[in-house]
């Protein structure tokens, strides 16, 4: 039965950037160039991918994930995001295990999805060609009608509905392309859009929740991962009141929403310089924090309240593994949910009646799928966890996939002390070492490698016999405030030295071949791969960099204006002479003469985060010096490769690169 007929039966209510470096020599002759994927991908210096190899790897590349997006109005069905025609689209799932019914048919990936309270409409975001300039659309799932609500040019996302389902609040750069203002509109009259909060700093401001009467808006201020505050905006007067956080003593304060009677706000905070924990702020006592008793000694990564705010749920990150807890707001108590599969949980969302909790769960053996925890009437009581979607895995027996081992290796802290650094170690199954090794470095830099489903790593293990070690170097999330800030500013290269320490750990393990090591990283991980090639090129055979920073000054000057100040908090302000000199000193582009390691560099032309120029200038410098470099530029992508055909090609070329430079005898 179609979604529309089901509604009747149930009686539902109605410019790529290009930077010219004047001091750089003329570009060397371009190596062999291929135009692939309908002319949307340029591949230079790499051999052609054979049909046999593409077929061999297709089993691993055919895995399809599903992400929980929203509940239907009746609370008996859900909406998910899953891939169709190469990009993620909105689908409807009537019940656990049922077939998916596609609702959007765009050529671009769908991002956020938010259902209208008390209604059927879905607001969602989508950008063109990976540009990152999200637009807001309104979808009626009963007939598939979709219309654009925003200007089609600026960045618009972080959607919040009011309780009446009439208005949307969102973050937008519409005013000047640089500042992250808060706007509000009636979805029935997009021309009514008006500026609710004008900001003149470089921080990210976004709406979190409307008050029940629609007269106030909870607003999040985010200047950096260790500097965020919570405000209350009076929509009539425009008065802005700071509720949590102190600009003179930066800390992390992430708002969840109003409490049961609207007299306070729940949030996640590390104000006590410990793991991120749950607190409450009384609205009549801004700045006062009431902490949840018996706090857990691990970071709370996500916190969600039901629509009536009578119950809650939160997720902790316990050395990379997610644990799920139910929360009773009235008694400020919590209880861990048992028998949850070991993996990573995200996207918590209560059903409209609060009796079910939807989520996305990914494990080492299963792609991300939608799960539902069925609840009892008591806030801390539950019945069972049910899997609603079953992602395709290309015919692979994922039960045979390798689980990583959590290991620790010593990295220098002071002259006489070491820091035990966490890493996940994947060992090829059924084989004897010593194994070639890929060091897999996460992005961020405030990211964290976690043991979720990763078909690429499993492909390397199974078909190349490569071991993978994924470190969480200093600066990674999940290990407390002190660890997170260890690579800030002038401490940047301390994280690179952590990779040097890991190379020492590899040398000490007879199961690993220290003479055959490669590094792989994307975004900030791409910078780390380049920096490893600079500092430890004599200890690695190959490096893969996708969308990595090659020069911190040019990166900060050319990343999109709406995010520039956010990155200055992490990397340092290049306008300050001391910082600029340091960033010049550590940038891989300025140390290119030290690089002899073969490199594979990949990029999306429309990347708003790390501009295309960061990769193209590095490729030009390497070629000028006669170094080995393969280069892939996807003309219809941004910071992430959203299109399956481009991701597949990148993985296939990476596979060939590792075969040629890591595995072959020198």
Image (tube, grey):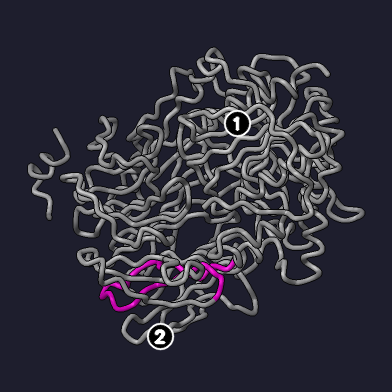
- Which numbered circle lies on residue 239? 2
Chief secondary structure of the magenta portion: strand
Dot 1: element = strand
In the image, 177 versus 193, the foreground residue is: 177
Confirm whether residue 440 shows in the render.
Answer: no
What is the quadrant of the C terminus in the image? top right
> Does residue 232 appear to the left or right of 310 in the view shown?
right
What is the quadrant of the N terminus in the image? top left
The residue at 74%/63% (across/down) is 489
Q: Residues within 10 Å of mark 2 (few under 14, many from 20)?
A: few
Tag in front: 1 or 2: 1
> Does residue 478 appear to the left or right of 396 in the view shown?
right
Confirm whether residue 608 shows in the render.
Answer: yes
Q: Position of residue 183 (x, y in %)?
A: 36, 71
Residue 392: say if magenta: no
Q: Residues within 10 Å of mark 1 (few under 14, many from 20)?
A: many
Which residue lies most toward the top here? 52
Range of magenta residues? 201-223
Task: Please determine whether, in this image, residue 281 is positioned above or below residue 644.
Answer: below
Q: Which residue is mark 1?
A: 43
Number of numbered labels in the structure image = 2
- Mark 1 and mark 2 in contact? Answer it, CB < 8 Å: no
Tell me the distance, in whole angstroms, between the alpha carbons under discs 1 and 2: 54 Å
Q: Position of residue 5 (x, y in %)?
A: 10, 39
The residue at 61%/18% (across/down) is 462
In the image, 298 versus 430, the foreground residue is: 430
Dot 2: element = loop
In the image, 474 versus 526, the foreground residue is: 526
């Amino acid at each position: 039965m179609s979604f529309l007929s089901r509604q009747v039966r149930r009686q539902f209510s109605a410019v790529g950037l290009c930077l010219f470096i004047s001091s750089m020599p003329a570009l060397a002759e371009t190596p062999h160039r291929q135009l692939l994927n309908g002319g949307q991908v340029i591949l230079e210096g790499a051999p052609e991918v054979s049909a046999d190899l593409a077929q061999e790897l297709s089993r691993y590349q055919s895995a399809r994930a599903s992400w929980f997006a929203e509940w239907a109005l009746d609370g008996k069905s859900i909406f998910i995001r899953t891939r169709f025609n190469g990009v993620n689209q909105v689908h409807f799932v009537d019940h656990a295990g049922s077939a998916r019914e596609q609702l959007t048919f765009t050529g671009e990936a769908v991002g956020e999805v938010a259902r209208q309270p008390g209604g059927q409409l879905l607001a969602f975001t989508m950008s063109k060609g990976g540009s990152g300039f999200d637009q807001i659309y309104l979808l009626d799932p009963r007939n598939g009608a979709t219309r654009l609500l925003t200007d089609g040019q600026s960045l618009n996302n972080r959607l919040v509905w009011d309780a009446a389902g009439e208005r949307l609040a969102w973050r937008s750069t519409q005013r000047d392309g640089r500042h992250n203002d808060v706007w509000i509109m009636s979805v029935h009259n997009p021309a009514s859009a008006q500026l609710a909060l004008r900001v003149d700093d470089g921080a990210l401001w976004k709406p979190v929740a409307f008050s029940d009467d629609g007269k106030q808006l909870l607003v999040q201020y985010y200047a950096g991962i260790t500097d965020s505050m919570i405000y209350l905006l009076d929509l009539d007067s425009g008065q802005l009141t700071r509720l949590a956080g102190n600009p003179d003593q930066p800390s992390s304060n992430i708002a969840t929403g109003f409490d049961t009677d609207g007299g306070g706000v729940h949030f996640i905070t590390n104000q006590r310089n410990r793991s991120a924990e749950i607190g409450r702020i009384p609205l009549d006592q801004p700045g006062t924090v009431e902490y949840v008793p018996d706090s857990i000694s691990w970071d709370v990564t996500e916190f969600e309240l039901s629509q009536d705010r009578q119950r809650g749920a939160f997720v902790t990150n316990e050395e990379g593994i997610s644990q799920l807890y139910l929360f009773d707001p009235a008694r400020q108590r919590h209880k861990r949910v048992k028998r949850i599969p070991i993996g990573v949980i995200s996207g918590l969302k209560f059903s409209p009646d609060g009796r079910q909790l939807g989520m996305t769960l990914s494990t080492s053996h299963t792609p991300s799928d939608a799960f539902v925890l069925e609840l009892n009437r008591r806030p801390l009581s539950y019945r069972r966890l049910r899997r609603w979607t079953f992602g395709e895995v290309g015919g692979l027996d994922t039960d045979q996939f390798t689980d990583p081992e959590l290991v620790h290796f010593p990295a220098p802290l002071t002259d006489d002390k070491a820091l035990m650094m966490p890493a996940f170690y994947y060992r090829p199954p059924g084989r004897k070492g010593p194994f070639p090794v890929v060091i897999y470095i996460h992005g961020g830099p405030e990211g964290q490698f976690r043991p979720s489903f990763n078909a690429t790593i499993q492909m390397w293990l199974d078909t190349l016999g490569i071991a993978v070690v994924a470190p969480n170097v200093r600066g990674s999330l999940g290990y407390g405030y002190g660890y997170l800030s260890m690579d800030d500013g002038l401490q940047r290269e301390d994280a690179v030295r952590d990779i040097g320490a890991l190379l020492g750990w590899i040398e000490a393990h007879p199961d690993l071949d220290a003479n055959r090591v490669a590094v792989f990283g994307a975004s900030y991980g791409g910078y780390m791969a380049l920096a490893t090639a600079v500092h430890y090129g004599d200890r690695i055979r190959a490096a893969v960099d996708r969308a990595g920073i090659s020069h911190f000054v040019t990166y900060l000057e050319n990343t999109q204006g709406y995010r520039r100040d956010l990155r200055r908090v992490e990397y340092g302000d290049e306008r300050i002479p001391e910082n600029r000199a340091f960033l010049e000193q550590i940038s891989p582009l300025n140390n290119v003469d030290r690089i002899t390691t073969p490199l594979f560099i990949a990029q999306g032309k429309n990347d708003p985060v790390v501009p295309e120029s960061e990769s193209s200038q590095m490729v030009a410098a390497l070629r000028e010096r006669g170094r080995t470099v393969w280069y892939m530029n996807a003309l219809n992508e941004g910071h992430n490769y959203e299109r399956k055909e481009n991701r597949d090609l990148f993985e296939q070329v990476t596979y060939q690169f590792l075969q040629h430079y890591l595995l072959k005898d020198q």
